[in-house]
Amino acid sequence: MTKKIGILTSGGDCAGLNAVIRAVVHRASLLGWEVTGITDGTQGLIARPPAVRKLTLADVDANVMRMGGTILGSISKGNPFAFPQPDGSVKDLSDDIIEGIKILGLDAIIGIGGDGSLDILNTLTKRGGFPLVGIPKTVDNDLGETENSIGFDTAVSVATEALDRLQPTAASHDRVMVLEVMGRDAGHIALTAGIAGGADVILIPEIPYTIEGIVKKIRAVKSNDRNFALVVVSEAVKTPEGEKKQQEFVDGQKRYGGIGQLIGEEISRATGFETRVTVLGHVQRGCPPTYNDRLLASALGVHAVDLIAAGKFGRMVAWKNRQVVDVAIEDAIKAYQAVDTDSTLVKTARALGISFGD
């Protein structure tokens, strides 16, 4: 019998998602299977009839692999176990999602997501009894049991390019440039891009800092016959008082934002140096994927289909030691991957004279 598998993208978008979808369709096609794309994550399974589209080889040519975002759409808010209602209450819609899967007659689902999305899908799996294989994607690279997640390499590449562009204008105007990058609660983007982009100061949530520590480094740079300095700040870095810097939006959600501006003002106040702040935000998500993200996405997508063929479910494909492996989804969710403050990259940064403000 022809297998019918579903695929969805959930959580925040990132570069490389379409390359995963392409790989899944190509591998499934070689096995004679059908692939159903579920639109807008679990939202597509709540709709009646379920919001889906059949995916064929004609839908996933090489051009799709070059595209950022996701051709299936995604959703990054609204827990299906407590979904917000117009009157302010919440409702458990998990049974609707499970019913949607049964309506579609799917033999298995491939879910592409971060720790939050995979946790939700895994819980739904246990409740509904449907087979699931997970694929890790997050620009934050904080999902455990995998060395890299889809989207991280591209986000770092964008942040590094931003530093490359900020350096000449900083030098032209004798300025300190502060770059705020994404990272949720982990500083992987800031750390990696900061080293690659020649930053003088890198601030990450895993290493406490002081304004005095930052200023000390910037003064040292300026006294060494250099008229500019580069500072990279992860959005999750707390204020000097230890508080999260967040903004509340009209929909009531609170999101990280503003720590770069605060740091810039503190630097300017303490040193008198002209300071400018750049916030990259979603620019790190929406661009074409790097070749590394395309390769990773292709390898993980193929292996996800092979796991279904082997009858191995409740697993997440992962990248370890330059090859694809699979791990239990629960293990990947539990093993949160923050920056190890004793890691090779942290030691490398310190050896290069980069300050963490501590």
Image: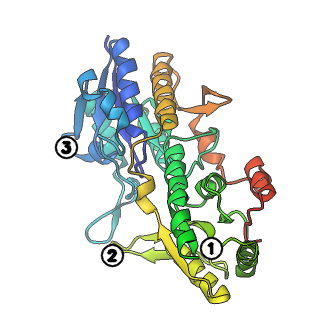
Q: Amino acid at mark 2?
A: Val
Q: Quadrant of residue 325?
A: top right
Measured along the vertical axis of the image, is residue 28 above or below residue 79?
above
> Which of the two discs, 2 and 3, labels the residue nearer the N terminus?
3
How far apart are the two marked residues, 1 and 2, measured between alpha carbons?
23 Å
Q: Which residue is mark 2?
A: 250
Q: How many marks?
A: 3
- Work out which quarter of the rendered image holds the C terminus and state it: bottom right
Measured along the vertical axis of the image, is residue 293 above or below residue 268?
above
Q: Which residue is mark 1?
A: 238
Q: Residue at x 58, y 33 (%)?
A: 318
Q: Which residue is mark 3?
A: 48
Q: Which mark is residue 73?
A: none
Name the residue nearer the viewer: 136 or 311: 136
**SS class, disc 1:** loop
Q: Position of residue 116 (x, y in %)?
A: 50, 51
Q: Position of residue 144 (x, y in %)?
A: 63, 44
Other residues around mark 1 within 10 Å, as few (<14) / some (14–19) / many (≥20): many
Other residues around mark 2 within 10 Å, as few (<14) / some (14–19) / many (≥20): few
Horizontally, is 234 left or right of 98 in the view?
right
Q: Residue at x 51, y 68 (%)?
A: 169
